[in-house]
Image (spheres, rainbow, N blue to C red):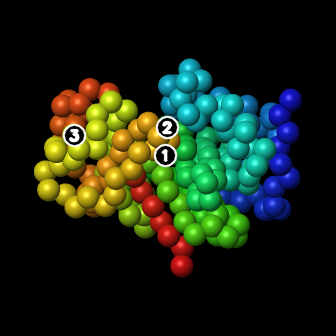
Amino acid sequence: MIYLARARRYDSLHYRERCGAMIIDNIKNVDELNKVWDFVTTIFPVLMTGEYKYSRDFWAEMASRLPELLIYAKEGEQVCGAVLAWDDGGSITVGTCCVAAGQRGKGIGKAMMLELEKRVRSLGYGGIALGAVEDAEGFYYKLGYSGCLLVQSETHSIEELLSLNPGYEVIATNVYDGTINQIYLNVTTPDHDIQRRYEERYPGCSTQMVFGKRFK
């Protein structure tokens, strides 16, 4: 049985700008978690395998800690958006942000992210970090997030990853979880060409624009 922590009291956000009657709230029980998860996996089917970090079991565990950071949008009884975030060792990471295809361009994603930011601030955290799929990068720039390029590999060394850098400033290097070699490059606007070069040169290497916002 999954027990959800008692969340701080937040009034659900009734969002009506350009999209009719829409409610934005956080997951409060297992039934809501299941409905949101069913929606998320229609956008990201890879999550259904259970092997990816952000699996249903992962979010069930996060719901037992900070359910107020598991936000979703619904129209009537139909879930049409979700932003799922968690406390990653004292900082907030967004694992999933998605909106139903037929509801995009109406400001739902923006409304959910702004609601998340409000809650993160109220909980006393200093900012938010996230990774973006390629077609969402512009969305986060518009919300005031700063981006850089993350290149990571379990099989290739940091030195190998750095050797392909065409000259971008190296912001940081890291070995995540003791197994994943990472470099962060100061790529302020997406450079998909260098991402493809990394992925072709080093099989198994992954690249992604990652974004952050600090709160004053």
Q: Which residue is mark 3?
A: 160
Looking at the rendered structure, the kind of residue marked 2 is Ala
Q: Viewer-proximal residue, 16 or 89? A: 89
Mark 1, secondary structure of its residue: loop
Tell which tag, 2 or 3, sits nearer the viewer.
3
Amino acid on which disc 1 is placed? Arg
Question: Mark 3 to mark 1: distance in Å?
Answer: 40 Å
Are the two marked residues, 1 and 2, in contact with CB atoms closer than 8 angstroms?
A: yes
Residue at 68% over, 53% down: 69
Residue 147 appears at what percent x and percent y? 36, 59
Q: Mark 2, residues whose alpha carbon is within 10 Å: few (<14), some, or many (≥20)?
A: few
Q: Secondary structure at mark 3?
A: helix
- Residue indicated by mark 2: 101
Q: Which residue is mark 1?
A: 104
Checking the image for residue 211, the label placed there is none
User: Could one spot residue 208 in this view of the protein?
Assistant: no
C-alpha span from label 1 to label 2: 6 Å
Regarding mark 2 in the picture, which secondary structure is present there? helix
